Image (cartoon, rainbow, N blue to C red):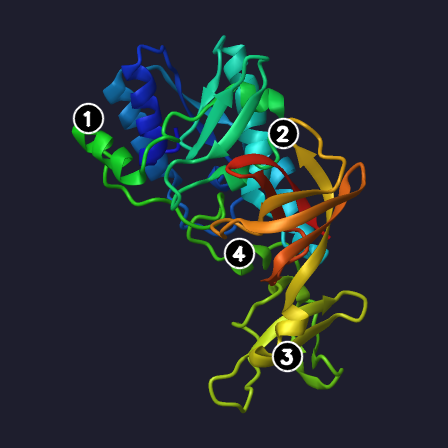
Amino acid sequence: MSGGVDSSVAALHLQEQGISIVGAYMRTWHDDDQHRPIGQCPWEEDLHHARSVAEQLRIPFSVVNMIEHYRQWVVQPLIEGYRHGITPNPDIFCNQFIKFGFLADYARELGCSGIATGHYCQKITHADGHCDLLEGHDPDKDQSYFLAYISQEQLQFAQFPVGHFLKKEVRTLATRAQLGNASRKDSQGICFLGKVRIQDFLAHYIPDSPGLIVDTKGRTLGEHSGLHKFTLGQRHGIRIPSNHDYQHYVVVAKDLESNHLIVTLEHSSSEKLFQKKITLRNLHFIHEIIDHPKNLLGKPRYRDPAQKIYFEPTGPTTAVVEFQVPQRALASGQILALYHEKCLLGGGIYV
């Protein structure tokens, strides 16, 4: 129970089905005041709402300390990723290792038969016992992308009680039950940063490393204070005037060896910024491994529509993917979620 309306209604819905439930709030890295360099994450408010709903539903409630696990499996990989020039996805790490990993282990220790969350996705259990994960019923709120790296075992232990609802239906159920957070706004941004900008956070861990900003022909345009402050496709923060009306410079590459930030005017960025073919590493599949070329669907990032792709494995954990339509700014370290129709198959990380 995060304190939001989705996990609260998930608990409500299970209870209304006669299922015995226990509420749990995860204390994660950002909740540890000793190690948090910057504030503005409303964890006290989150905990208050989660506890209040649990009291209203008259269910047992506990606060589970995941701070060290979170630091090791989510925060450090995020920092090291940016330090080495990639753009990781911490929300996917959180689901893979924390929510459906260590928190699920805690649930088993309590004797629970499963763990339920407020994710907008749906699970189907087949006659042979294996499970498939489908997109949420609400296309505007589908969160299956963030579960691309959970395992079959984790999926079998999971439940998604609000996955077949529309968001407005969830709010209606919360209002009808007079839950105190029925109209509370959804959380935004990276899971543990709250309102803190990622660049402000990274500044506490990665020192500036100044270098040159150059165009695609190698001409020097200015200086940057660190490649970790930029990602592919970024326009803001370059701070170089284009001298062209309605045109901005955009990041098209980061050269780690020379410490050069490579930019070009946006109108001429198509060749550098749009990719039709990419390589994936660290492939993961929720059920069956795809070890042969196949036409699939892929979501380049959260909230992107599914794209038609040709998937061609090149090794046990690598593949080449060709998009039918070129995609913009596929940053190294981000994740392509793989689908067959509405069924999530797994994912891979952009090289």
The mark found on residue 198 in the picture is: 4
Q: Quadrant of residue 42?
A: top left
> Residue beneath label 1, please?
177
Q: Secondary structure at mark 1?
A: loop
Q: Kindly report the distance in space between the C-alpha atoms of the residues bearing marks 2 and 4.
A: 30 Å
Q: Quadrant of residue 168?
A: top left
Say if mark 1 contacts mark 3, CB within 8 Å.
no
Q: Mark 1 or 4 closer to N-term?
A: 1
Q: Kindly report the distance in space between the C-alpha atoms of the residues bearing marks 4 and 3.
A: 24 Å
> Residue beneath label 2, please?
286
Q: Nearer the viewer, mark 4 or mark 3?
A: 3
The mark found on residue 133 in the picture is: none
Q: Nearer the viewer, residue 189 or 282?
A: 282
Circle 2 residues within 10 Å: few <14, some 14–19, many ≥20: many
Q: Mark 1 or 2 closer to N-term?
A: 1
The mark found on residue 264 in the picture is: 3
Image location of residue 345, percent across then percent down: 61, 34
Q: Secondary structure at mark 3?
A: strand
Q: Three-letter amino acid code at disc 3?
A: Thr
Image location of residue 350, percent across then percent down: 69, 51
Q: Three-letter amino acid code at disc 1?
A: Ala
Q: Residue at x 59, y 43 (%)?
A: 337
Q: Mark 1 or 3 closer to N-term?
A: 1
- The reply, left or right, for residue 118 in relation to residue 58 is right
Image location of residue 190, percent across then percent down: 49, 48
Q: Mark 2 or 4 closer to N-term?
A: 4
Q: Three-letter amino acid code at disc 2?
A: Ile
